[in-house]
Amino acid sequence: MPTWEEKLADRMDPQLAAEIDKFETEIALRKQGKLDEKVFAETRLRRGCYGQRYDNGHRHDGIRSQELHYNSDLTKGPDTLWDAPGMQRIKIPFGGLNPEQMDVLADLAEEYADGVLHITTRQDIQYHFVHIDDTPAVMRRLAAVGITTREACGNSIRNVTACPLAGVCNTETFDVIPYARATAKFMLGHPDAQGFGRKFKIAFSGCRQEACALVNMHDLGAIAATRVENGKVQRGFEVYVGGGLGAVPHNAKLFEEFLPEEELLPITQAISRVFARLGEKKQRDRARLKFLIAKLGIEEFKKLVLEERQTLQEDTRWTDYLDGVEQYADKPLKPPTFLNGQKRPEGFDAWYATNVYRQKQAGYVVASITLPLGDLSSSQMRDLAALARRFSGDSVRTTVEQNMVLRWVSESDLPDLYRELSRIGLGAPGAGTIVDVTACPGTDTCKLGISSSRGLAGELRTRLAAKSFTLDEAVKNLRIKISGCFNSCGQHHIADLGFYGMSINVGNRKVPHFQVVLGGKWQDNAGAYGLPLVRVPSKRIPDVIDRVTDRYVRERAANESFQDFLKRVGKKDLRAMLEDLTQIPPYEVDPSFYSDWGDPREYTIGDMGVGECAGEVVSVAQFALAAADGLVFQAQLHLEAGDYSSADQNAYKAMLQAALSLVRAQWPEAPDEADSTIQEFRQRFFETNIWGDRYAGNKFAQYLFIRHASPPANYSGDHAHRVVEEAQLFVDAVYRGHEILAERGAR
């Protein structure tokens, strides 16, 4: 009789099985010191294995609210990768899951992690607190049910995302899932996608006007399109390239108005080859595709891709999958039925109003499962698998808003489904509303986290849910998204109300803050990016939400969108409305400001201490930084008015002012002259990298150097938006630079 391991091996794709064996060997070699750490780091990242943060020993929500009981040493922090568990990311193309896979995912979370599954903003699933020695076993069991962790992280093509309503959406052009699946399969481990300098993200959307898959923020985005040729309807895609969020977001550029479906995979391959060949390799902060396209221009980039396309050797996989694509469709579990006059359990109507979507197929609906902060327990995932078997079959999806959906539910089954969801703690309403706050891991587990995005998200969710029945209709469908740092993993740039974390020194203590970002647009596939408006202490962010939304309700014109309202009011007025919220009471008056949401400890991001000898320097520096902040704000006003030249000039001046403030902290008589400031700043701070690897100060310094060396010949909205965003990030980094100087002065 075959062993359990042999049975597992029989179910695995042979190539994936061989790769996992190789990874297990590499783990052993690294532990023996026979494999270089840098080489192994890229290897493990390509297998989805991250290190994680340990200075925060608890999570900020109902599932992870208690100290981790099974290993009391986890709060101490590991000295190396081997001393304590890390994070394992799992690739879920287009978010598609079936009940068998859900059962395995639940079992693994329970056996190897902390019993929690986290849904990411890329439709992935993450485990936290997984020991690297256990990862090969996890990977094998996932592979046995058709799931891989390969290229879930690293300089690779990340998870291919798609609209969770694809195939059942009322406004889609056609179902994009077969194309998303084919792209994910074709590009997984593809030789032409192994030489990237950074990650590469792909998304598919069935229609242009909805959020769908947020095409505008992707390296490669495809929107379903059709045209009539010789009397026959032909499928294809409107293709965009070079989008991305990160510290400075870029709007994707139109690559092709109509790319025939048979050209999708070869063009994706050609784009990968051009990116691998010409993309930046040394400077990671300039290594995304968006920077290559900004450097070359979209026309030159397209020319190079089409030339590359002509050199490709024919591959049958480009078109083999197309034979049955028009007939592709999910198979419903039950016949269509309607709700009619069925008795509805308590709470059902509120849940139905926000969590149920009527499919284009009559009698069927999509039921959204709201997951606070994107988390569910292993037992909840196991129960969901059972509900999928009962109500929807194999048609389950994760979403970019960190939820899950059951599709093809017969409408008459909704009351029973709601009862069961409520029983397992997953019957909360509010999916896709202002209550449904998105947040990255932040300071809970991310090494880059500055402020507690999850802690703030949990607080906002609790407050908004408590008054959800009284919220004005105009406010209910706004989106709130929170990132723990500037990197936009929480997608704050495309939220109606976005926030990203930072810290500010007040006396000899640190205070967690968030930058308020307004004006982003979730609809139209991430149709617009917001800009930072003002820094506010973390504990006052709920007041920001209240003030902005209350004013919108009071003053909006008939049918005026939130984005149009913000434009009409203007940044100057909005900032003035929030200015008093930036004030921080002394620690002795209100110490709560000096801790973060969900964490009673005094807030810190490392060792701190300010000596008296730095007092006057800090005072002068704060003066200069306030002027830099003012210049950034003036740049935003010019950008808002369409004066792109003035926006660029003010943003540039803000960076120079901030850089000079650091230079004068060491050389008080430094001249106020651009070339001298750049030279002194480069020698004193950039070349010495006072920020270290964590705070990205050197990355943001590049923004100043590039703008100084290459003033724009022509001014455009895209360019000005980017420079204003870069200036804000640079000024924020200089704040941190002054903190580091003060800390050094105290030692």
Image: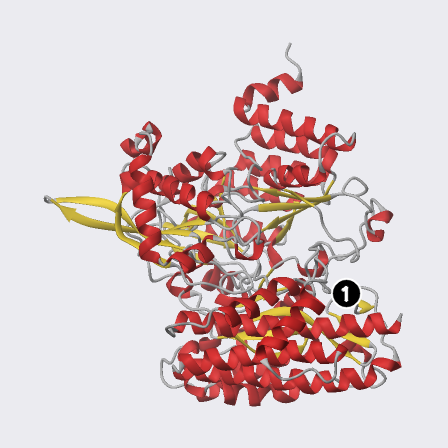
* Residue 177 in the image, given as x and y percentages of width and height: 38, 43
Furthest residue toward top: 1
Quarter location, residue 506: bottom right
The 10 Å Cα crowd at callout 1, few under 14, some 14 to 19, many 20 or more, is: some
Looking at the rendering, in which quadrant would you find the N terminus? Answer: top right
Disc count in the image?
1
Q: Residue at x 33, y 59 (%)?
A: 208
Task: Say whether residue 715 is left or right of residue 620.
Answer: left
Q: Residue at x 82, y 71 (%)?
A: 743
Whether residue 489 can be seen here: yes
* Residue 688 in the image, given as x and y percentages of width and height: 72, 62
* Residue 519 in the image, given as x and y percentages of width and height: 47, 75
Task: Say whether residue 620 is left or right of residue 243.
Answer: right
Tag 1: amino acid: Ile
* Residue 319 in the image, given as x and y percentages of width and height: 30, 33
User: The residue tagged with tag 1: helix, strand or loop?
Assistant: loop
Task: Say whether residue 742 is left or right of residue 191.
Answer: right
Q: Residue at x 45, y 57 (%)?
A: 290
Mark 1 sits on what residue?
605
Quarter location, residue 372: bottom right
Query: Which one is in front, 352 or 664?
Result: 664
Q: Residue at x 84, y 45 (%)?
A: 71
Whether residue 13 can be seen here: no
Looking at the rendering, in which quadrant would you find the C terminus? Answer: bottom right
